[in-house]
Image (spheres, rainbow, N blue to C red):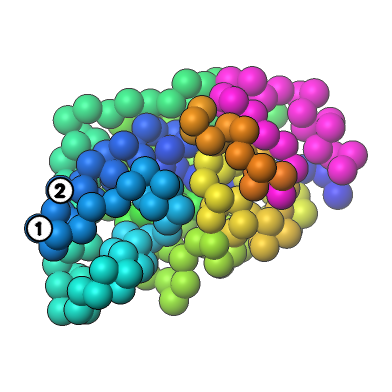
Amino acid sequence: MEFSTVIFDMDGLLIDSEPLWNKAATTVFKQYGIKLSDEQYNATTGLRTREFVQWWFRQFNIGDEELAKAEKNIIQLVIENVQQNPVIMPGVHYIIDFFHQKKFKIGLATSSPQELIDIIVELTGIKKYLHTTTSAENYAYGKPHPQVYLDCAEQLKSHPHECICFEDSFNGMIAAKAARMTCVVVPHHSQLKDNRWGAADLKLSSLQNFGQLHIDLLSRR
């Protein structure tokens, strides 16, 4: 089956928002006496904010009473910081134009809330190229569950085998593979040599390194 569709994750892939999520979580968690190491934080990258907060609240034996408040405060801080200092990842405009020129259907599937999706697609200038966006915000399960990718493909009227997904997180990669899609990972440079990316179909150091040669290579897998 030939590829006809590309689906992008958002945070950490299209915009350098992961440091902002980390900063916001650090600020809010400090109120509850929680301090995460980089390793702990990275282990839960790609989860929805609700699941991220719930996971660490349980690890630190904090009750569920404050879950909704902490989640809301983290999201609000991220939105404020993204609006004040948006940092678009290298190669974003290149890769969107690359697939647009090839007449691929283009979607976005993320764990982030729709409010943040709307802000980021405006800030990056890619809104007019996207055929659909899906958020796992209100799903029963977020990534690594594949539903957000499957729903995105369904809205694009594409079979999963026609889809190439671009991800930067381990949980996102698992979601894409569970959806039976081809997955290209573009990890943070500090995680580039991590063995766990072996489950991906292709690993790149930047979006701007992707080209027709890679499509041909992935088509033969």
Q: Nearer the viewer, residue 9 or 69?
A: 69
Figure quadrant of the C terminus:
top right
In the image, taking residue 179 as reference, residue 111 lies left or right, namely left
Q: Which residue lies furthest to the left in this view?
A: 31
Residue 58 within the magenta-colored segment of the rendering: no
Q: Nearer the viewer, residue 41 or 206?
A: 41
Count the numbered circles shown.
Answer: 2
Residue 203 within the magenta-colored segment of the rendering: yes
Task: Find residue 27 and name its label.
Answer: 2
Q: Nearer the viewer, residue 161 or 141?
A: 141
Q: Residues within 10 Å of mark 1 (few under 14, many from 20)?
A: few
In the image, taking residue 156 as reference, residue 43 lies left or right, namely left
Task: Read off the magenta span.
Answer: 199-221
Quarter of the image holding residue 60?
bottom left
Q: Where is residue 41 in the image (x, y as percent from the top left)?
A: 37, 50
| CA gap, disc 1 and disc 2 | 7 Å
Q: Where is residue 74 in the image (x, y as percent from the top left)?
A: 20, 54
Q: Evaluate if marks 1 and 2 touch, with contact meaning CB atoms under 8 Å apart.
A: yes
Q: Which residue is drawn at 71% across and 49% down?
A: 199
Task: Find residue 31 and name its label.
Answer: 1
**Residue 58 vertical placement versus 171 (above, below):** below
In the image, taking residue 37 as reference, residue 162 lies left or right, namely right
Q: Which residue is drawn at 59% across and 59% down?
A: 175
